[in-house]
Amino acid sequence: MPLRRKLAENKRSSKRLTTNIASDAQWCIDRGTSISFKAYIERFEPLDQRAAEQRYESICKKYLNDKVLADYKIWTKSVPYVRYWMQRNENIRLNKLTQGSDELIDTVNEQRMVALQKRAAAGNSNSVEPKDDLSASASEERATASSSSSVEPKDDSPMPTSDKHRNHADNTPPLAHYEEQGSWFFQDNNITQLFARYRNVAQDLISKHTTLPPEDYCNKIAALVHILVLNHDQQSTVATSIFGEKLLDDLTHALRSDAMNYSIDLPDPVYLEVSKLVTALSMNKTTADEVILKIMIISATLPYGQRRLLRCLANMIQKLPATPTAKNSIKEMALWSTFYDPMISCLLADPARKVHLQWIDTIPAEGGQSRPDAVIVEKQQRLFVRSRGYGEAKAEGRSPHDISVDFIRLAVFSKDTIDVHQLDSAIGFQIHEGLPAFFNLRNIHLLLAINDVFWRLCVVSGNRAVIAYRYRPTPSNWQDFVDDHHDSSRTPSLRIDQ
């Protein structure tokens, strides 16, 4: 090989050997299979989640093995990953607020020092009286208080105007429950300890049988996910033997009484007038357009919850078929989009409050591997950021197995969004039958109570530290506990109504 060509090849080879690898990529390479995305985030402290994901995935594909990439994908699809970023962003926000407060204090101190120096200089010439010192200090304190109060954003969202809506929490008698040393007590019974025993029984069943039929064991499957299911007069035999039937019924009644306000009602004149309109429509004495217009006019003067209820009715008149449909002829999509969406989208959503009902069938923002049929999600600026409830729909005639699994899924979805966003509560709704009679006294009380409890309790907690302390991780493999066998002879052990 000619000398000149050999020198050129050596130069190109030397250039390849000295090519620089980015410091973050080299750091990952040095750690080999022990590297994790969390360690990468903690080391390089990216402020943008999406950019961090793109960069780390690029490094994995280019420099690391398939196992590291697989571990990364598993973690980023989990609930703990979403909670990790939520907590990280919250810490960053708090740090910024702390820094802002420190800067404010430094600025005020500097201003005070300058003022004191001026007063000292002026004092030598006897040009300032002591009363000005008090006046200046008061002015500075007012300025500091005004600056500090701007840290917390003002909530200008519309609120229910009904006295019953506003005062229910104040008028409800306090429950005989409290927390002590990490345990929840009710009527001097340690519910946390009793639930641990109940959960151990469920774990023993899984150890012995591997899976459980959800129709009969949905309570125990939920317990494995750290969820205690309570429903009056429908407690399982195992739960009754551990907690005692009276304790379970008292706890169920107390929690329901504390949350639900069934005293909200439509004024009698409004109920009678709307009933006449609906009756006239059913007898073809008027048109749907005329009834809808009159209902909207009536609703305009009512408090928030009652107004939304009547708009539900107007939506349903607008969208529901005028004649009955054949049994089992309604498919799943038609069931929720035609029959239930007009009602639920008014009760549990309101664009004016930046809360929307979406039928998405995709993995929610809180992560996990399951897809709810519907999500009630809160919007901030241009993004949907916080789920406050979920829904599952099954067409009439579906198996009890599917209905029971949907119930567990709703419980898990609700737990996860409470954990991630530190909510006081989350709501779930399940559709698996045709639409019941709507405009009667019982359903009016029930729907108004549902509207009230959603807007009052399905919100970010005022004591987020307590919610965070109660957190228990959701097992990512909880669906492995569910027996896939469909047995048409089984009936769901729970019926959810009030």
Image (tube, helix red, strand yellow):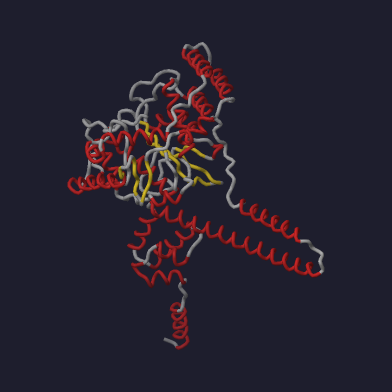
Up the image or down, 312 lies above or below 24; here it is above
Up the image or down, 120 lies above or below 379; here it is below
In percent of width and height, residue 426 lies at 42, 40
Picture quarter containing residue 144?
A: bottom right
User: Residue at the spot x=52%, y=43% of the render?
Assistant: 379
In percent of width and height, residue 27 lies at 42, 71
Q: Nearer the viewer, residue 19 or 206?
A: 206
Q: Nearer the viewer, residue 144 or 434?
A: 144
Quadrant where the image shows the N terminus: bottom left
Up the image or down, 86 lies above or below 121; here it is above
Residue that lies at the very extreme toward the left in this rendered image = 208
Quadrant where the image shows the C terminus: top left
Q: How many marks?
A: 0
Q: Nearer the viewer, residue 319 or 262?
A: 262
Picture quarter containing residue 115?
A: bottom right
**Image position of 58 (left or right of 490):** right
User: Residue at the spot x=27%, y=43% of the render?
Assistant: 221
Q: Nearer the viewer, residue 444 or 38?
A: 444
In percent of width and height, residue 445 lies at 44, 25
Residue that lies at the very extreme toward the bottom in this rendered image = 3
